[in-house]
Amino acid sequence: MDILKQSMEWARAEVFSAKIVWLFSIIEMLAALGFWHLGRTPMAKAFVWPLLVGGVFIALVGTGLFLANDPRPDQFEKEYRLDPDSFVQSEIQRTGKSQRELSLVFTILPLVIFLAATVILVTPASIWRAISVIVIVNAGFLMVVDSNTE
């Protein structure tokens, strides 16, 4: 029964993470609105679209996270009641897959951050710098959220 409890807690933590992701997306979209309304410099104006697109992207990530994990606690309980041994085996496979994906995320996102930082250093165009900053912020935020998965 301990694995059932841990699986259910994991799914609830993922749902909580989705809500945090939504909150971040709202903040990001509000920042886009702020830059649009108050931005006077070319750099400030360059942030409007990257922030808006980044906020929508993060909102979609949160939605996917929520939709994938919200029904899981009930599913886990039903599966465990039907066949505990099969449930344990499927959870071992799921957690192994999740750990591999987490490892991949923590390999790819730092590379994305490095590439975006390089763009900031070599490009004088405000829009590309703004895009790179938002990519770095979003990638860093996703790494923070994904660290909760472990």
Image (spheres, rainbow, N blue to C red):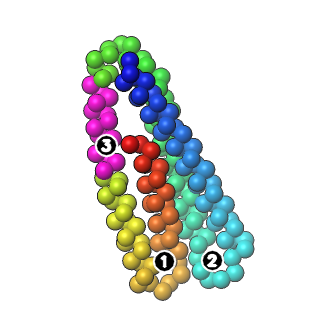
Q: CA distance from mark 1 to mark 3?
A: 33 Å
Q: Main secondary structure of the magenta part?
A: helix
Q: Quadrant where the C terminus lies?
A: top left
Give SS at disc 3.
helix
The amino acid beneath tag 1 is Trp
**Location of residue 125 with respect to 114 vertically, above or below:** below
Instruction: Identify the magenta region.
Output: 89-103
Give the mark nearer the N terminus: 1 vs 3: 3
Name the quadrant containing residue 53.
bottom right
Residue 1, image x and y in percent? 38, 18
Residue wearing tag 3: 99
Foreground mark, 3 or 2?
Answer: 3
Query: Which residue lies at the image location 33% right of the left edge and 41% below the top edge?
Result: 98
Mark closer to the observer (1, 3): 3
- Residue 25 location (% of width, % of height): 58, 54
Q: Secondary structure at mark 1?
A: helix
Q: Label 2 is placed on what type of residue?
A: Ala
Question: Looking at the image, which residue sits at the far front?
Answer: 2
Residue at mark 2 to residue at mark 1: CA–CA distance: 12 Å
User: Would residue 67 be seen by someone viewing this image from the given angle?
Assistant: no
Q: Which numbered tag is attached to residue 128?
A: 1
Residue 27, how many percent across, how many down? 63, 57
Check disc 2: other Cα within 10 Å, few if <14, some if 14-19, many if 20+. Answer: some
41 relative to 143 in the view: left or right: right
Pointer 1 local density, CA inside 10 Å: few below 14, some 14–19, many at least 20: some
In the rendered image, which residue does mark 2 sit on?
44
Asked whether the viewer can see residue 123, the reply is: yes
Q: Secondary structure at mark 2?
A: helix
Instruction: Residue at 42% x, 48% y: name it.
Output: 147
Disc 3 residue crowd, few under 14, some 14–19, many 20+, Cα 10 Å:
some
